[in-house]
Image: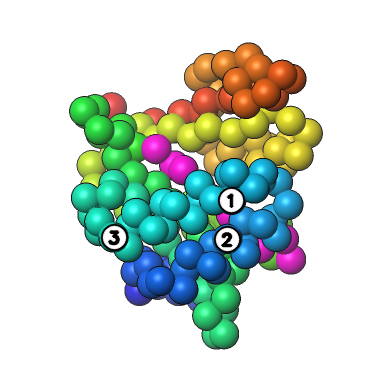
Amino acid sequence: MIHQSGADVLFDTVAVPEDMDRVRDLVTRSGNFTPEEVEMAVELVEARLTMGDKSGYYFLFSREPSGQLSGYACYGPITATDGRFDFYWLVVVPKLQGSGLGQRLQEAAEAAMKHAGAKRIYLETSSTPGYLRARGFYAKTGYHIQCVLKDYYRTGDDNLIYMKSLSE
């Protein structure tokens, strides 16, 4: 467990088999993701469970006393780069969006990445209206658009690639 000082939030870094269903439920409830994207999120948990650090996927889980997830972050180093990391997922249960939990998860994940040698963090998101709030959040927290891949996910849905420099 990692205690985010001053925030009274405990983040658990250990994935357990029940997290596959918990992540599926959380990502589905967020309402922004396709069924294929939901399954992709679950596959990353499964990879972590079966391969450990070799999977390249690291997690921070925010758990309610019942064990249900209130949020999570997933990130990992980009193979064959010098200190570049991908920020794969940052999801918070809808009732807690805007509460600061997402920012605390993000800050804790960024600190873990920096501790692991990250110099730059990349993340991708959609250009559709459902992701407007996420894009505003990323901009507010120091991420800048580096690239737009037009019609990437589907026609009219661009892939926006953001980057945040930690040091260089």
Is 101 drawn above or below residue 116 in the view shown?
below
Q: Residue furthest top?
A: 150
* Front in this rendered view, residue 52 or 8: 52
For the stretch drawn in magenta, the main secondary structure is: strand
Image point 39% across, 38% down: which residue? 86
From which residue to which does the magenta span run? 86-95
Indicate which disc residue 78 carries.
Answer: none
- Please report whichever mark, 2 or 1, sits nearer to the chain's N-terminal start: 2
Residue placed under numbered mark 3 in the picture: 50
- Few, some or many residues within 10 Å of mark 3 (<14, 14–19, 20+): few
Task: Tell me whether the residue at label 2 lies in contact with that at label 1, contact meaning CB atoms closer than 8 angstroms.
Answer: yes
| Amino acid bearing label 1 | Val
Task: Tell me whether the residue at label 3 lies in contact with that at label 2, contact meaning CB atoms closer than 8 angstroms.
Answer: no
- Please report whichever mark, 3 or 1, sits nearer to the chain's N-terminal start: 1
Quadrant including the N terminus: bottom left
| Amino acid bearing label 3 | Thr
Residue placed under numbered mark 2 in the picture: 24
